[in-house]
Image (cartoon, helix red, strand yellow):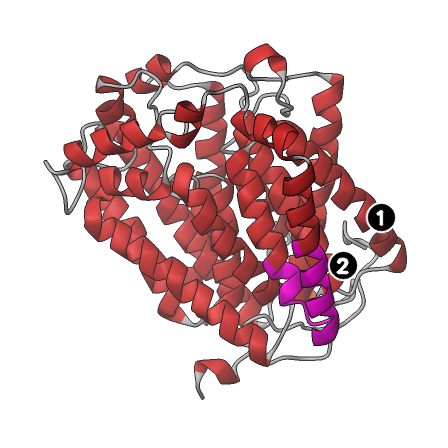
Amino acid sequence: MTQLEVVHERVTPSPSKADPTRRVAPWLPAAWVALFFISSFRFTGSRSVEAAVSGSASAENGMELAVFGAIGVVSALRLLFGIPKFRPAGIALLSLYSLLALASTTWSVITLFSLVRASQFVALSLFVAASASMWSSGQRSLESDWRRIWGTYLLIVVAASAAGFIWPNWQGPGGARYSWPGIHTGTTGEYLALGAMVALSMLFEGGWNLRRRTRRLLPIFLIGAVVLLILTITRSALAAFLVGSTLVVARASRIRPDRKLILAGVFASVLVCAFAWFWEPLSEYLLRGQSVDQFTSLTGRVDLWAFALSEAQEAPFFGFGLGSARVVLTKAFFWGGVGHSLWIETILSIGLIGATLLTTLLVWMLIQTHLIQRIHPGPVSNLGFAYIAATLVWGISSSSLALPGLGLAVVGLILAAMSSSKRERPAAPAEPGDPAS
């Protein structure tokens, strides 16, 4: 049986309350949602780059480690005492990457930090394998869990967005950029962009099986998320959203090909007219008060990357240890706590070997979600392909995915769903308990 003969994103009948699958690992959806948010929020206030480089721990670090540690231990026990059943290709790549990150602690310039971060990668790899195994064996319903995970995610986005007005946290020059409390405005943009992509997938892709009242609320959420995303003035998130949302709609199974062409024409016309008629205000918005030179240098990132690549020549294949950019870059850039690029961060951390493994994983996932969507369209491949493509755009100027956070958790979830190996079954209606129902 070839890989394409298997539907990785099967939709199994939603279990009833009497069904034992409801009692197997009921924590699984909540654990995935926790991984989306636990690495990003700073409840005790933001930390300076100097404090981060010094290695001083915060309360948030303790919470993050506790969550990852608990998930990793429970996942390891389920794999150890169960019968793992999943398609191994993608999970093997993620596991190799995690083991390389763990091995980097032996040569790291910040050994303890690298060890902590690498252990989080290992915990995620175990959770991905455990989730895929439970979905493959029928112990959990992928369709139900997928809907519950993303329904909860959207509810948290709504709550956090409201909190952003109740406890204002506007950032940037003059406080012009919207942000959620306790979180960087750029990261806020990433959460909003993903939420908008999820809403679009729910609207236009079959297999979500949402209740009618939920579908009626989705356009309101979508408009609100896009407006707030614009208010963050996060250029990378806006670019990633344009790419991801276009792919969600272009590949949606509920839209006929002729209508997709019409939508593409309308979208292109709107973009051309917007830039033709509103070029001056749009250019001012994108510049964010910067000069043209600052804009073309990506707010100093180009110089940072040039310095990073020159430093990387000292350890080109294995890097300086996971997360070492915060030490290497701050020698010349006081604000360089991270590589501000997925690839730069990865090369500095675990070298060209790690960057090759990560690139191979992302390209493999992109190809597989594309092929699966062509043969067996559904929510996982529709959202998965769009998000991986958006991640490649984000990765140009953001370190998302190179360290624990939203990007890594979402890629892990998509990989776990793709690695499920059950055949497709008839879709079931949403359960009353689902947040998206």
Question: How far apart are the alpha carbons under marks 1 and 2?
Answer: 10 Å
Most extreme residue toward the top, as rendered?
Answer: 174
Image position of 316 with respect to 373: above or below? above
Please tell me whether residue 279 is drawn above or below residue 24 in the rendered image. above
Asked whether residue 265 is drawn in magenta, I would say yes
Let me know if residue 90 is in the magenta part.
no
> Few, some or many C-alpha atoms within 10 Å of disc 1 (few <14, some 14-19, many ≥20)?
few
Q: Dot 1 lies on which element? A: helix
Image quarter in which the C terminus is found:
bottom right
Label 1: which residue?
A: 217
- Residue at the far front in the pictured view: 276
Residue furthest to the left in view is 314
Q: Identify the image quadrant of residue 256.
A: bottom right
124 and 346: which one is in front? Answer: 346
- Give the quarter of the image for residue 336: top left
Residue at 68% across / 42% down in the picture? Answer: 274
Between discs 1 and 2, the one toward the N terminus: 2
Amino acid type assigned to the residue bearing label 1 in the image:
Leu
As shown in the figure, which amino acid type bears the numbered disc 2?
Answer: Leu
Identify the residue at horizontal 69%, vertical 16% (top origin): 168
> Which residue position is annotated with label 2?
203
Query: Mark 2: which secondary structure?
Result: helix
Quarter of the figure with the N terminus: bottom left
| Residue found at the very far bottom of the displayed protein | 1
Res 140 seen here: no
Magenta residues (range): 247-268
Where does the image place residue 110, in percent across and percent down from the top left? 22, 27
